[in-house]
């Protein structure tokens, strides 16, 4: 029986093979959800799903695409935004 705090849904089960052939259950923290586009809500690619602590040790260049609105808008919405800005 898992400990009380492991039953709440905060943790996910990870099955690991232990030496001797036994399968043991490890409890790991769930990953945060994928970031989404601020305009259309589409899931953003190029952004790792890491915990805030691990994000602190990740280089900035690996946390979002290096373009205007990178990490905020998806590529299609960025294209629309830039073309509308240049027209007006
Ligand atoms: Zn979008």
Image: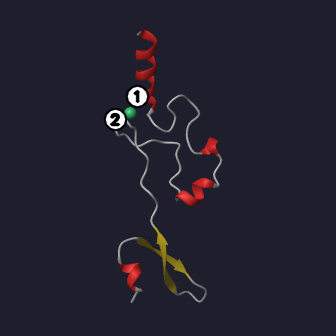
**Mark 2 neighbour class, 10 Å CA radius: few under 14, some 14 to 19, many 20 or more:** few
Looking at the picture, tell me which residue is in the foreground, 69 or 23.
Answer: 69
Residue sitting at x 43%, y 50%: 34
**Mark 1 neighbour class, 10 Å CA radius: few under 14, some 14 to 19, many 20 or more:** some
Query: What number is the disc on residue 12?
Result: none
Q: In this view, does 88 lie above or below 6?
A: above
Rendered location of residue 52, percent (x, y): 53, 57
According to the image, label 1 marks what residue?
A: 77
Rendered location of residue 27, percent (x, y): 47, 76
Q: In which quarter of the image is the C terminus?
A: top left
Query: What number is the disc on residue 40?
Result: 2
Q: Do the residues labelled 1 and 2 touch (CB within 8 Å)?
A: yes
Looking at the picture, tell me which residue is in the foreground, 52 or 64.
Answer: 52
Q: SS at mark 2?
A: loop
Residue sitting at x 46%, y 61%: 31
Q: Is mark 1 within 8 Å of ligand 1?
A: yes
Rendered location of residue 69, percent (x, y): 49, 31
Which quadrant of the render holds ligand 1? top left
The reply, left or right, for residue 60 in relation to residue 74 is: right
Looking at the picture, tell me which residue is in the foreground, 26 or 41.
Answer: 41
Residue sitting at x 52%, y 87%: 22
Q: Is residue 77 above or below residue 3?
A: above
Q: Does the residue labelled 2 lie within 8 Å of ligand 1?
A: yes
Report, in whole angstroms, how far the alpha carbon at label 1 lies from the one at label 2.
8 Å
Question: Residue 30's quadrant in the figure?
Answer: bottom left
Q: SS at mark 1?
A: helix
Q: In this view, does 16 lie above or below 61?
A: below
């Amino acid at each position: 029986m898992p400990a009380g705090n492991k039953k709440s849904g905060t943790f996910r089960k990870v099955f690991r093979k232990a030496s001797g052939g036994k399968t043991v259950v490890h409890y790991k923290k769930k990953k945060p959800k994928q970031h989404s586009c601020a305009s259309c809500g589409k899931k953003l690619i190029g952004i790792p799903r890491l915990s805030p602590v691990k994000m602190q040790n990740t280089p900035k260049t690996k946390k979002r695409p290096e373009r205007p609105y990178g990490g905020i808008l998806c590529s299609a919405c960025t294209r629309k935004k830039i073309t509308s800005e240049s027209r007006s």
